[in-house]
Image: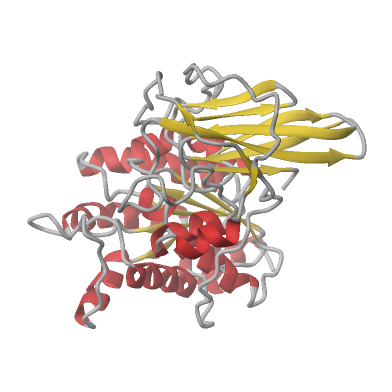
Amino acid sequence: MTRTIWLLMLLTGIAHAAPMTGVRRIVFCGNSLTDGSAWCDWVVETLQANGHPNLIMFNAGVAGNSTALLKARYHKDVLGVKPDLVVVNVGTVDNKPPEDYRRDLGALVEATRKTGAKMVLMTPAPIRNTNNPAYRSVVYTPVIHELAKQYDCLVVDTQAVFDKGLAEGKEMWGPDGVHHKIEAWRGMARAVLDVLDCRAPLIEKTSIYHNSIIDWVIGPAIPWTNSAPVHLKNMPEDYDPIAAGKGAYPPLPTNTDGWRQYDRKAEIAKTSWWQKCWLERGGVMPMGQDVVPGKPGSPSRDAGAFALAIIISDAEKQTTLHVGGSPPYAVWLNGQMVWNGHVLHGYHPSQDRLTVTLKKGKNRIFVFSNWLFHISLGEI
């Protein structure tokens, strides 16, 4: 095929005929509508079962992210994992004029397309508790279509997903009018699969993240109050996670006798449908689901707990430690603090990736948390 014919195909849209060709690493990014939701996992599980078994997923969503905040961390969290396909779902919490939105989103699109990665742009999901639920969709959708045409991206009409669901009498929003019920997750997953030319039935499954550590023993609750408040926005893309927060954590335990085995299946069984996917991905709640009466899975305000995992290495070697979850929490490897997070992170693994050295034999990973953490170890 000559370059001229290929360019003509690109301009006429024929190049989209096989959007998953050459895609192995896929990243979803945005705010809590991506971050805390299972629909991204369902997209990947469905694709894996239908012709793409080696597909690797990263979720780079962070609750509360505007397009500008996503832009600030985009090179680290999204392009840093070398994606072949990026799905961007951002704009619902934006309040900037369309020209500012175009500047910020355009920077993400241009940077991504320069790497050769493909893109899916989702129009902003509507909000129920406003005078005009479709406001952001109306304001920002033309910008998205303009960028998609300029940079050859696929577009998902999220507004149409909600319009269809509401017309069918489905409950699309949770009580806050922003976050979604399961029917909205299904609609968004289906819409993304459709633009990726996958018409197979949706597989509603959330798998354990790559190399996640799920075998933990948990210590007793320790009275603790966070002395370094969480920043409700993200640090610049080059921030140092260890310097991001210096809250005083309890000293590492010297005796773990009598600690309980973390019962992951039991925690999954008694959590809400909303939080279930966090734990299914390999997340750990050392305080358990019963911390706050009447609010299963809520973080403790006045206590925390240590968790311990033992990793056996056949040799001394460097590897990557993937860290995610909800701050504040800290991670120690063989007695040395390697991560201390007070910056808002997502409900999924691999928000930060650190190079660490395992010693030959037994390695001890301690985590202190008052809510949720994910830890995985190894190259992806």
| Residue 153 seen anywhere in this rendered image of the structure | no
| Residue 297 seen anywhere in this rendered image of the structure | yes
Asked if 251 appears above or below 101 in the picture, the reply is: above
Percent coordinates x, y for residue 326 in the rendering: 46, 39
Residue placed most toward the observer, 315 or 216: 216
Which quarter shows the N terminus? bottom right
Left or right: 5, with 378 as reference point: left
Image quadrant where residue 379 sits: top right
Residue at point 85%, 29% (across, down) = 359
Residue at point 47%, 18% (across, down) = 247
Residue placed most toward the observer, 282 or 189: 282
Q: How is the image coloured?
A: secondary structure
Asked if 362 appears above or below 153 in the picture, the reply is: above
Percent coordinates x, y for residue 89 in the rendering: 39, 54
Percent coordinates x, y for residue 134 in the rendering: 17, 60
Asked if 194 appears above or below 274 in the picture, the reply is: below
Residue at point 38%, 53% (across, down) = 296
View extreme (left): residue:
131
Percent coordinates x, y for residue 146 in the rendering: 33, 54
Left or right: 243, with 31 as reference point: right
- Report the number of numbered marks: 0
Left or right: 77, with 294 as reference point: right
Residue placed most toward the observer, 190 or 367: 367
View extreme (front): residue:
258
Left or right: 128, with 90 as reference point: left
